[in-house]
Amino acid sequence: MRVLLQQDSGRYEKAVLSGYPNYQSGAPVGILLSGIIRAFRGGKYKSRLLQSLSVGVFNRRIPHPKTPCDWLCYNEATVRAYLADPYCGFGFTCSAFGDLFHLVVMMHRPQRYEHVNQELALLFLRGKDDPCVGGEQGSEDSRRVLAKAGFRCIRHVDYPHMRHEILAETGRGEVYGDILEFYQGAE
């Protein structure tokens, strides 16, 4: 979404960023590494190393995980459904990881934002325990980059005892209510 806003923020009046990833200083190394692996194994190759160094890091931040995907949600039924779904959790290809690392680098560069719609209302939502966001420091950094790019209407909500998939947590009604209020309300 943030890379989209670099060129097209004028098309929108409001936008919600949920579970927004934070910048990872290792992303340039990820670009290089995914390129090397892709050169030898092909773009469709699924590298356990890239998986471990990127998405695999998230579960390491969860105390006593029961599954490799506990970082997604406290709601165990959601995690089980995710693991059982053949369209989920199959892992990125080397090419997809390369693209992801490029996006992470691009989103963190305020100078890439052109013709910023300063009146665009942005709502950042995150589970307080979401390892993708990078905690309070990562959350603040994401908002700071957009403020530096010129966005002036930035609001954020942190939900206690929620992880990445806040729309699938037990308390998701509060999240849906906040989103509805944001879109219905005058900013």
Image: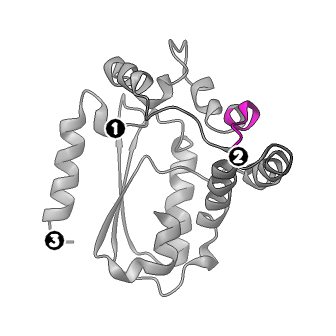
Q: Which residue is mark 1?
A: 166
User: Is residue 48 shown in magenta?
Assistant: yes
| Neighbours of disc 3 within 10 Å: few (<14), some (14-19), many (20+) | few
| Tag 2: amino acid | Cys
Q: Amino acid at mark 3?
A: Ala
Q: Secondary structure at mark 3?
A: loop
Mark 1 or 2, nearer chain start = 2
**Residue drawn where x is 81% and y is 43% of the image:** 41
Is 80 within the magenta? Answer: no
Q: Which residue is mark 2?
A: 94
Image location (x, y in percent) of residue 148: 55, 74
Q: Which residue is mark 3?
A: 186
Left or right position of 89 against 94: left
Is residue 86 visible in the rendered structure shown here? Answer: yes
Q: Which stretch appears magenta?
A: 44-51
Sequence-first disc among 3 and 1: 1
Image coordinates of residue 5 in percent, x first then y, are 46, 73
